[in-house]
Image: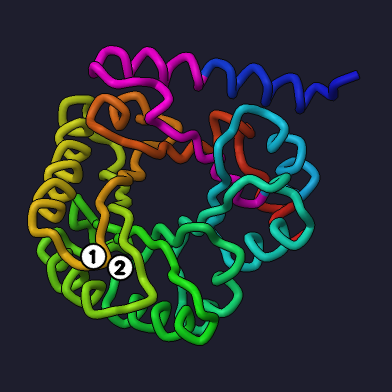
Amino acid sequence: METPEMQAMTAAVAEIREHIAAAARQAGRRPEEIRLCAACKTRTAQTVRASAALPIDLFGENHVQELARNFDAGAYLGKPAHLIGHLQTNKIKKVLGRAALIESVDSVHVLQAIDKEAEKRGLVQGILLEINIGEEESKTGASPEALWPLLEAAAAAQHIMVHGLMAIPPAGTDEAANRAFFAAVRELAAQAAARRYEHTAMDVLSMGMSGDYENAVREGATIVRIGTAIYGARDYGTAAQ
């Protein structure tokens, strides 16, 4: 018999899938273009493993230690994991080989450190460049203007592949402003693609979370990162367990 937790997650994922599909069709897109990333920050390996049996495409981890723990425990059931939180250079070694994509690269320094470690491993690491689209002082991410030096650095790197952009728009904006931020990210990606940088594909837009993922889909998101709407409110007391 399913636990109440599993029943709740099953219903939540089904509802999210329906909303993604509806938003995609409104935008003239195919629902299968959008991947559902479960942002599983602070969840136990047991909960992550249970949710991995649902139609979730990949998992997003904010903290390197939680990525390593869940990956090593097999909690993702073979599904990809992305690092979506801030990455410190001293933790890059723990991420490579575990994260299919690092979504939070926001400086030339971090990009070059990833490239250096990837060269040692003999692999090419996929990344997204995180853009602070609202240019908020409280958030990580590069400014829109800093995207171009980042792409130039990626073009010179041999063990990096930039697949696109990640962004979190300012909270508390109305729907029109929220969509405008997502549209600005999409336009940045289009400009980057037009410049045809080496080692850059620009085929992924990771944007939209529990409160605004439908707007993100309408504006071109290919990955939406959903945490609370799948798992419920976070219990930070279990984060270290």
- The structure residue drawn at horizontal position 59% and vertical position 23%, both measured from the top left corner, is 13
Give the image quarter of residue 160.
Answer: bottom left
Residue 142 image label: 1
Callout 1: SS: loop
Give the residue at x 59% y 69%. Answer: 97
Give the camera-side residue of 119 and 45: 119
Residue 67 position in % (x across, y down): 63, 60
* Res. 222 image quadrant: top left
What crowding class fits label 2: few (fewer than 14 Cα within 10 Å), some (14-19), or many (20 or more)? many
Q: How far is the residue under mark 1 from the one under mark 2?
A: 5 Å
Q: Which of 241 and 88 is in front in this view?
A: 88
Frontmost residue, 224 versus 200: 200
Q: Report the side of 70 relative to 120 (left or right).
A: right
In the picture of the structure, the residue carrying the numbered disc 2 is 106
Q: Is residue 26 in the magenta section?
A: yes
Measured from the top left, where is residue 72 in percent x and y?
75, 62
Q: In this view, does 130 lie to the left or right of 6?
A: left
The stretch of residues the image draws in magenta is 16-42
